[in-house]
Amino acid sequence: MQFLEWNYHIEALEQINGFDAQEKQEAKQALLYLQTILGDDFLRRSSLEEPFVARHPLLRTLANFAPSSRRAITRFARQLRILERSQNLCNVVARLHNVTQFDHDALLIKLASRLVVEGLEARFEPTMEVKNNQKQPDLRLEDPVAGETVFVEVTTQIASQREREITDANTAVFTAVFGTRYDACLSGRWESMPSKHALGRILEKIDDAKMRAINERNIVTVREDGILEMALCRRDQANLLHLWSVERDLSGNGLIGPTMSCNDTVRIKRKIRDEQVQLPEKTANVLVILAPDVFFRAGGLRRVAREVEEGVFKYDQVHLVILHGEYIGDSEGPSACEVGEHRYKRRIVDGFAEHDFVLVNRHSQKKLSESFFSKLSRSF
């Protein structure tokens, strides 16, 4: 399958619109670097399922042929380069093929690279002497000037089963449409999630519809009663897809639905409870949680602070809890505000909006120094 070859993605850079020559060259170098670091067979090892579904986050990024996805690849390669001299980085790189671990390790790499740029030294797990089954934080940061040591534990707010099903179905569709040639576009709506058998049938319909759209130079629809309605057309005829989408109240160029309910703040407090045990009691510590949906689904920052800080205050050895999220899109622009003693920041990086909500535990026994806190604040 061409999609699982590095060369396919390197050659496909020439077909991506809205990408200038320098960006294409940087993305090419990033892909070559990742091929060297991760291995020629990394993409194949990361997904061996039938029907093929790009569950691995790096494969999902590659399945999106928008310029923003290749900028994300370039940033990830740059972060790894920054950390090349950090102790035990090889342990992190060796498990990047693991679909269940990648989001955690990508956030760990992002955090560590930013703080190394600030002059700190990073050591990955094991971060302390290994003895008596002692818990090991993910990251140890040392300030060589001040002699200060801080431990960081990184975790992810795992998507619910229903969210994972939606993600898997979407990436399977995107791979079916873009997996061989980037010459089509799509728009549609999920009414409900398909079974594995139904998904296989839908992917066959999509493959047939794509070929008809390309050969007949017209819009072609795919329908599965009660499950999916979508349309495809040639990329150079995207205006046809726009008209079809407007008639159905769709924005075009993607899939939407179905709706979901959530209890994000409750799950975050559980995550704090479970992860704080990794952190030592004699130092100031930081817990970073990848929780992207909390910035949109939990009822606003004040409600998040009110509901989550109770879980933060319980644990003396945790000075900061950082909720982090990242999304494609920069329409809102950067912003910052304070919610009581806590801080929120939205920054725009290469077309991505990054959200960070830093929750401060005023009851923690150990505090970060002003110097260390400043370096962390510039990074998050």
Image (cartoon, rainbow, N blue to C red):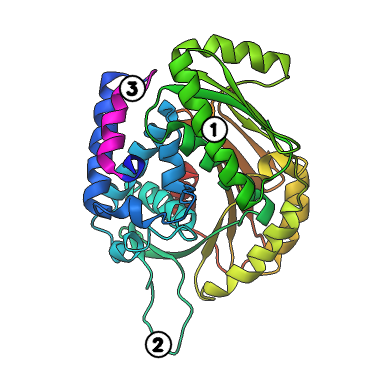
Q: Secondary structure at mark 1?
A: helix
| Circle 1: residue type | Ile
Residue 190 vertical position relative to residue 66 in the rendered view, above or below: below
Q: Residue at x 38, y 76 (%)?
A: 128
Q: Residue at x 36, y 49 (%)?
A: 113
- Residue 299: horizontal and vertical position, in percent? 78, 41
Q: Residue at x 57, y 20 (%)?
A: 220
Q: Is residue 19 found left or right of 352 in the rendered image?
A: left
Residue 316 in view of the camera: no
Residue 87 vertical position relative to residue 107 in the rendered view, above or below: below
- Residue 2: horizontal and vertical position, in percent? 32, 40
Nearest to the observer: residue 353 or residue 285: 353
Of labels 2 and 3, earlier in sequence is: 3
- Residue 180: horizontal and vertical position, in percent? 37, 33
User: Which span of residues is magenta-colored?
Assistant: 5-18
| Circle 3: residue type | Gln
Say few, some or many: other residues with alpha carbon within 10 Å of mark 1 (under 14 / 14 to 19 / 20 or more): many
Q: Label 2 to label 3, Cα distance in Å?
A: 53 Å
Residue 15, numbered circle: 3
Q: Main secondary structure of the magenta part?
A: helix
Of labels 1 and 2, earlier in sequence is: 2
Residue 208 in view of the camera: yes
How many labels sit on residues?
3
Nearest to the observer: residue 291 or residue 255: 255
Say few, some or many: other residues with alpha carbon within 10 Å of mark 2 (under 14 / 14 to 19 / 20 or more): few
Of labels 1 and 3, earlier in sequence is: 3
Q: Disc 2 designates what residue?
A: 131
Q: Disc 1 designates what residue?
A: 206
Nearest to the observer: residue 321 or residue 100: 100
Q: Label 1 to label 3, Cα distance in Å?
A: 22 Å
Q: Secondary structure at mark 2?
A: loop
